[in-house]
Image: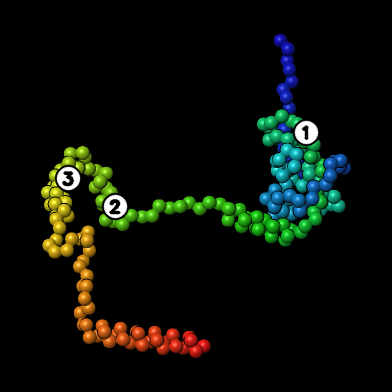
Amino acid sequence: MAITAAMPTAKERPRRTRTKRVSALPAVKVSKLLPSHIDLREPLKATLVCEDCQTWCPITGMQSRVQKVVPHHTGKAHVADAIHCRGSNRVVEFDMTIVEWHEALADAVTEASSRTATAVLPKAFSPRTDQTLRARAERTPAGRVADWSAVQVAVSAADAARKDFPSGDRPADGPALPLEPQNVEAYEQRQREIGRHYAQSKAARSAA
C-alpha cells in the first residue's frame, strides 16, 4: 500500500518577517484602497485586504523604512491549500495620514448609511379599527347572513325612499326661476343707470 504525503495547508500570517524580498508588482497606495479595506486603528498592527487574494493581511515593517504585505497563502490558515499569493511582500505606500484615513472612513460610513433602505413600519390601527378587523376575521358565513338579515329591512326602505320624487319641482328639472323682476321700479332704475353709464363711456372714447 502506497503512502502519499498529505497536501500542506495554509499557514498563519506572521506579523513580522525578516525577509528582504520585495515583490515586483507596483506598490499598493493606501489612498487608492477603499477606506474599509485597510485598518489603521493600531498603526503598529496595521492590516489591509490583499488586492490579489482579497483576504486580510498584516503589514510588516511599520517601524522600518519599507512597509510590505507579509508573505501569505491565498486561503484560510490550516484549512485551505498552501498556495503562495503573488501579492506577498508587495510594497505599501502610505500616501495619506492616519487622520485622513479616519476622515475618509467616516465619510464612507455616512454615505453607506444614507443608501441603506429604512424599514417601513406599518401604521398602527386605532382601537376601533382594530376591533372591527378582528370581528370581521372571526365572523363565519352564517354570521354574515345573520348580519345582512338584520339590516335588510332598513336597506330596502332606504332604496324605496330614494325612488320617491318630492312634491313640486322635479329634481331633474331644477328649481323654478322667476320670469319677472320682483321689484319692477328698482329694476327700471338700475337699467337707466346702466344706460347712462354706457353713454358717458362711449362719449369719452369718441373724444379721445
Which residue is nearer to you in this view: 106 or 40?
106
The type of residue carrying mark 2 is Asp
Q: What's the mark number on residue 84?
A: 1
Q: Is residue 32 above or below residue 173?
A: above
For disc 1, the neighbor class at 10 Å (few under 14, some 14 to 19, many from 20) is some
Q: Position of residue 208 (x, y in %)?
A: 52, 88
Contact, mark 1 vs mark 3 (Cβ under 8 Å): no
- Counting residues from the start of the chain, the first of labels 2 and 1 encountered is 1
For disc 3, the neighbor class at 10 Å (few under 14, some 14 to 19, many from 20) is few
* Disc 2 secondary structure class: helix
> Which residue does the image show at 69% across and 57% down from the upper left?
104
Give how far apart the Cα atoms at labels 3 and 2 are: 22 Å
Q: Position of residue 111 (x, y in %)?
A: 62, 56
Instruction: Give the labeled residue for mark 2.
Output: 130
- Counting residues from the start of the chain, the first of labels 3 and 2 encountered is 2
The type of residue carrying mark 3 is Trp
* Disc 3 secondary structure class: helix
> Which residue does the image show at 67% across and 56% down from the upper left?
105
Which residue is nearer to you in this view: 99 or 31?
31
* Disc 1 secondary structure class: loop
- Counting residues from the start of the chain, the first of labels 1 and 3 encountered is 1
For disc 2, the neighbor class at 10 Å (few under 14, some 14 to 19, many from 20) is few
Instruction: Give the labeled residue for mark 3.
Output: 148
